[in-house]
Amino acid sequence: MSNTLVSPVRPMLAGDISAVMRIQAECYPPSMLEAEDVFRARLALTPATCWIWSPAPDNAAAYLFSYPSRKDAITPLGAQFKLAAAPDCLYLHDLAVAPDARGQRAANALVAAALDHARAENLEWSALVSVQQSQEFWGRLGYAAIEVEHSPVKENLDSYRVSGSTQAAIYMLRELT
């Protein structure tokens, strides 16, 4: 009998999209939900940077979509990823953990997998947009808030604001070197 631990983090597959849609609906308000075809296109574009956290077979409970980008570039909510010709950054676009999986460090495991990948690709930065008051979580992982003042990046950041909410979306950056 082997004592080898199997990581619950694995690459995302097309068959995981139905679980992704379920998790997204459990985690975000309706104004922040992204379409299934957008998720499928993102996965097809950059499958090496999309992960699932599944503590048991066929039990996806968290996901992370990311892609190679440039520092200070923000993809608007609901838009397709545009891969940078000369990326210097791994942009973490969407991390979600189903409510019944919270407290199991799924988010930490997914981010660790992404940052390991970024370092292996010699990327210097990781960036993201913090939503739903998650800035403290990201700060614990080494990300710092960055002021965004210029268009179109500011407009892209503003696309993450929840309708009728005063909660700001915050651009955050972490150096990897």
Image (cartoon, grey):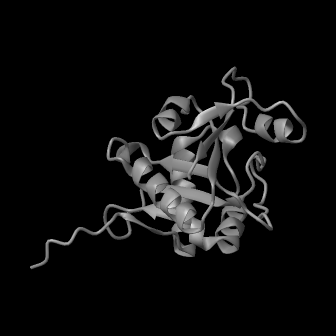
Q: Residue furthest left?
A: 1
Q: Position of residue 113 (x, y in %)?
A: 46, 60
Taking 28 as reference, is 150 left or right?
right
Q: Of all residues shown, which one is farthest toward the bottom? A: 1
The residue sitting at 59% across, 43% down in the picture is: 174
Whether residue 173 appears in this view of the structure is yes
| Closest to the observer, 51 or 90 | 90
> Please, which residue is most extreme toward the right here?
151
The picture quadrant where one finds residue 42 is: bottom right
Figure check: 155 above or below 58? above
Q: Where 31 falls versus 62 (above or below)?
A: above
- Residue 65 pos. (x, y %): 60, 58
Query: At 68% from the left edge and 42% from the top edge, which residue is drawn?
Result: 32
Q: Residue at x 73, y 62 (%)?
A: 87
Q: Residue at x 85, y 37 (%)?
A: 155
Residue 150: % across, % down: 88, 34
**Residue 92 can be seen, yes or no:** no
Q: Indicate left or right for 30 with 107 as reference.
A: right
Q: Quadrant of the N terminus?
A: bottom left
> Residue 95, image x and y in percent?
54, 49
